Image (tube, helix red, strand yellow):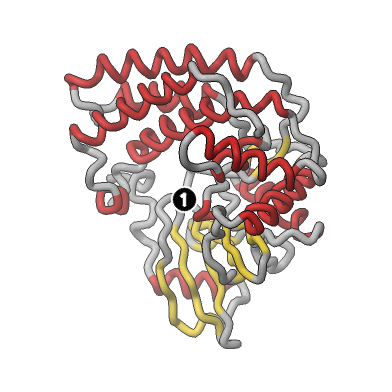
Amino acid sequence: MSEDTTPYAGLSPELILDAMEAHGFSPTGSLLALNSYENRVYQIELADDTFCVTKFYRPNRWSDAQILEEHAFTAELMEHDLSAVGPAERDGTTLFDHQGFRFSVFPRQGGHPPNIEDPDTLEVLSRSLARLHNVGAVTAFQTRPEISPERLGAQSREFLLAESFIPTELLPAYTTITEQLLERIQPVFDGLPRQNWRRIHGDCHLGNLLWRDNTAHFVDFDDCVNGPPIQDLWMLLWGERHEQEHQLSEIMDAYAPFADFDFSTLVLIEPLRTLRIMHHAAWIGRRWDDPAFPRAFPWYNTDKYWSDHILDLREQLAKLDEPPLTLN
């Protein structure tokens, strides 16, 4: 295996602690690996009896400029009194390098996933996202990507068709359904103006939201991109169509007084959900040579997984035939 497929083979506890000390931090020697697959993330105790969270970035994924744009965005959000957990600065930078490993150090943020079934919680969260999107609209990312069917869908499809993960007998079904989906999704994106796109969180699922003291704390901006604000909102929806429309109405009641919203982008909800499903399947495959991934996703390389995946995609094709969600 190469360094590209086993990028963290040399990341020992000793190296982690040495890296911290080399850049002005004072670890006690106590560290705990946290649940993260794309990067390696550790909770580390410091000599002043506080804790930090140190993220070692996956090599060859983001450039230094892209990571620093992420950091600048979180700093901008914090300047506007939003709780976005951003990295600590030392010697004028937030991105450090030690023996070829790039890393950043974040304060530990306590909290739990928000209960979005609670109307008051959903209201606060929606207002916070509106304010986040207002900050995101000030300028655009210059080096980070944008949401697109090509990047998330077509490239994912091309990768999986070129590899040997999909069982041979299921290849025709996968080939056909993904072709049909992309043929449907691309015109939806092409038919919408881009002037309301902005910097967004990009991966705003409940695992990247912490709730404490009646405040939403946004963490892990690793996937922040230029895109439509609806990308950060649709992941808050759950249940049947009528339930999602009710939730969407509650979200907009809280969101709209604080930020403009292009309601024509509601048509993107199911295309975005489809692209996320396609991209996630390819993401696991791209990382399969990293030993952490077969351990975390042992079902990935099975006939059942791919049968279920194709079924999910067929269900998405049916949803693309339905009218977009509307407000109650």
Residue 68 in sight in this render: no
Q: Residues within 10 Å of mark 1 (few under 14, many from 20)?
A: some
Residue in the picture at 56% in, 73% down: 52
**Which quadrant of the structure image shows residue 5?**
top left
> Viewer-proximal residue, 193 or 288?
193
**Apparent side of residue 26 relative to residue 250 in the rendered image (left or right):** left
Residue 62 image position (x, y, % from top left): 55, 44
Q: Judge left or right: residue 57 versus residue 196.
A: left
Q: Which residue occupies the foreground of this view, 281 or 17? A: 281
Q: Which residue does the image show at 44% across and 59% down from the upper left?
A: 40
Q: Residue at x 74, y 59 (%)?
A: 82
Q: Amino acid at mark 1?
A: Arg
How far across and down, in percent of the image, does residue 311 sit? 30, 26
> Height in image: 242 above or below 50?
above
Residue 322 position (above or below residue 205):
above
Instruction: Say which quarter of the image contains residue 136.
Output: top right
Q: Is residue 257 visible?
A: yes
Which of the pair 19/184 is nearer the observer? Answer: 184
318 w.r.t. 66: above or below = above
In the image, what residue occupies the spot 47% across and 17% down? 182
Please state if 237 lies on the left or on the right of 167 as rendered.
right
Which residue lies under the disc numbered 1?
Answer: 58
- Position in image of residue 268 (x %, y %): 59, 26
